[in-house]
Image (cartoon, helix red, strand yellow):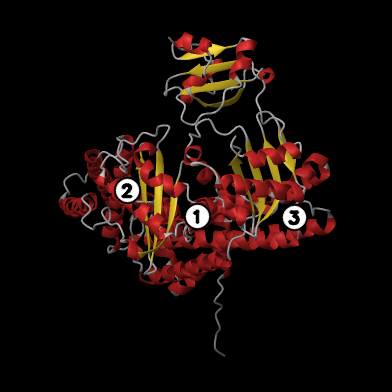
Amino acid sequence: MPLKTSYFKKELWKQAFRSFGWIGIGYFLALLFLLPLQIIMVKTKNDPNDINYYRQNIDSLFGLNGEIQGVLFLIIPVLAAVFTSRYMHVKGSADFIHSLPLRRSQLFAHQFLIGYMMILIPVCITACVLFVLSGVMDVAFIYQSNDILNWFYETLTFTTFLYAIAYFVGTLTGMSVVQGGLSFIFIIFPAGISMLINENLNMLLEGFSVHNASFFSFSSNLTPIWWFMELSNKSNLEIANWIYGIYWLISVIFIGISLILYRIRPIESANQTIAFPLLKPIFKFGVTFCFMLLGGVYFGAVQQQSEGWMIFGYICGALFGYLLAKMLIQKTWRVFDQWKGFMIYIGISIVVILSVMFDWYGFEANVPEKGEVEGIYFVEQNTFNNWYGGRLDQKLEQSNITNPELMEKVINLHEYILANDHIGQYQENIYMEKSTDIEIIYHLKNGKRMVRQYFIPSMDEVEEYVKPILESIEYKQSSLDWLNDKNNRISSVTVSGYDYRQQVTDQYTINKITDALKQDYLKTSYEEMTHSRLYGESKYLEFEVESEQTYFYHVPLLNSYSKVLEVLEQEELDRGLTIHSTDVSMVAISNTQKNEEIVYELPHMEKIDRNKWMLVEDSEQIEELVSLNNDVDGTWKIAYYGPSDKNFIEAYQVSEDQLPSFVTDYFE
């Protein structure tokens, strides 16, 4: 009778559990403490405030100790992979286990599954405990059965992905310490390399925008750390099914590659930094490249994008990375006589960097012809409608300028910026009161998109081009498009004044406010739109808008919004919108342009330059000052402080001809 042997090797599992079964046990106890025990404590305490908090703020199980869950998601899969791969990294273990009468595919399957069980079993048991709790206790205010399934699936997806990566790294290296370090580097690599390349291009290329790099944004979003943060901070976050599918697909690919590499991996590679000789130059120059980019970003950031310092940073970073990689590969610090590879690398790199610096590819000088442009999305970052106008990332595929005359003005603005070297350059840019960033997104007729972003030192320099764009009806309607979207439902409006907030939920009143705002906003002048937001807005409307998700939008309540103010007065919602002398205990006045940053802390400062600031506490003088009107072209700053510990109320500009004589006399 033929002898049958089992594919399942019981002794391997026993030995593995004795060696590192503590990982699964520890993971289970941690999950038990973070979820079921936490829920039991909340339920047995039966505090109405706690129950109300969980009911309103916790929409999934990731809302319970989500940050700690995220840390466990990162650490446990890597630990499990490191310990299950350790037999490959220790010479004695590698020689022994590979001498057993087992095919390599069998060894791989056993070791991989042993580590995976350390992740899967604790998650399964925790999910079962949660199901039992939901059956014997009323925990509906925290979670329901559907939430358990979502938590189980999402946890398993991300931990499987991380375990597959860490195990893949284990087949590439011969040292457990290196495996652990490289595993975390692999995990953050998409986001890290995207950030480094983006930052370098942003410093080297005039007009470069992060919205140029859609691939880099996509690769960053694939980094699981990003999703961990989102899940813990936004408990009701819904992740698209295709994201899960990509994670599972990549996991399977990594597992398959790991098996292929393991079958050809030399046994004698134990204790080697890199197990495959072919991968050593890739590792060496990969580390050199990353440190080169990091050096350029560091010295460019601290030296205001100086090109000379950036080149110095590239050389120093590349040198450090090259030597570090050589030391890791050879496991010795005696590598300072091996320069041939570095000189070849740095020579090629300098040529590539200089080609970008001097724009050999024509990126900076490229301005599309009017006939090539189908539409433009234009953003001036410092106007209040773009601070409050909603989410820019949702608008990039749209055009807010399609009028041929306005498109021509945008193209003329683009050409003017390029013709004036001091405009648009990020080198040594200092943001002043009228500084801003302008982003131009061309939607071309050939289906492509061209994006440019420029720093503008002062809006006065480009007012001739920007003013007609910002004052156009087309631009204004797009800036607050959420207000006109019929798919949106405004569920509440909060009216915030200097010291009072009122929320409106009556739909009739909300409609009156929004209709009035639409009319007033279309009449907003360029001067009001570009008025400095340094002090913020003490009067504003906050809209709670429900569409696919709930969003909150803020709109400053300008004094010129006569129709809105009239509606608020009719509905008795205007409390706190006007400053009265009885609300003010002190007024500060200055005629210099360099005191904006201290306006909030002025009453509490030990030393105040009385040559630059006049402080008024006389009640009669305060009554005269509160009647001054806001003048966006005024050169004098005036700030009001309340009686409660001289709290900041409001600050704005006034013209000199409004000032009472006692103010002008003070500064003479």
According to the picture, the residue beneath numbered tag 3 turns out to be 143
- Whichever of labels 2 and 3 marks the residue nearer the N terminus, that label is 3
Q: Position of residue 391 (x, y in %)?
A: 54, 51
- Whichever of labels 3 and 1 marks the residue nearer the N terminus, that label is 3
Determine whether the residue tagged by mark 2 lies in a helix, strand or loop: helix
- The residue drawn where x is 51% and y is 62% is 161
Which numbered disc, 1 or 2, marks the residue closer to the eye? 1
The reply, left or right, for residue 471 in relation to residue 621 is left
The reply, left or right, for residue 636 in relation to residue 73 is left
- The answer to whether the residues at label 1 and label 2 have Cβ atoms under 8 Å apart is no
Task: Answer few, some or many: residues within 10 Å of disc 1's Cα (few below 14, many 20 plus, some between 14 and 19).
Answer: some
Which numbered disc, 2 or 3, marks the residue closer to the eye? 2
- The residue drawn where x is 32% and y is 41% is 426
The reply, left or right, for residue 453 in relation to residue 399 is left
Q: How many marks?
A: 3
Q: Position of residue 329 (x, y in %)?
A: 29, 53
Residue type at numbered disc 2: Asn
Cα gap from disc 1 to disc 2, whole angstroms: 35 Å
According to the picture, the residue beneath numbered tag 1 turns out to be 474
Above or below, comparing residue 161 to residue 626 in the picture = below
According to the picture, the residue beneath numbered tag 2 turns out to be 200
- Whichever of labels 1 and 2 marks the residue nearer the N terminus, that label is 2
Image quadrant for the C terminus?
top left
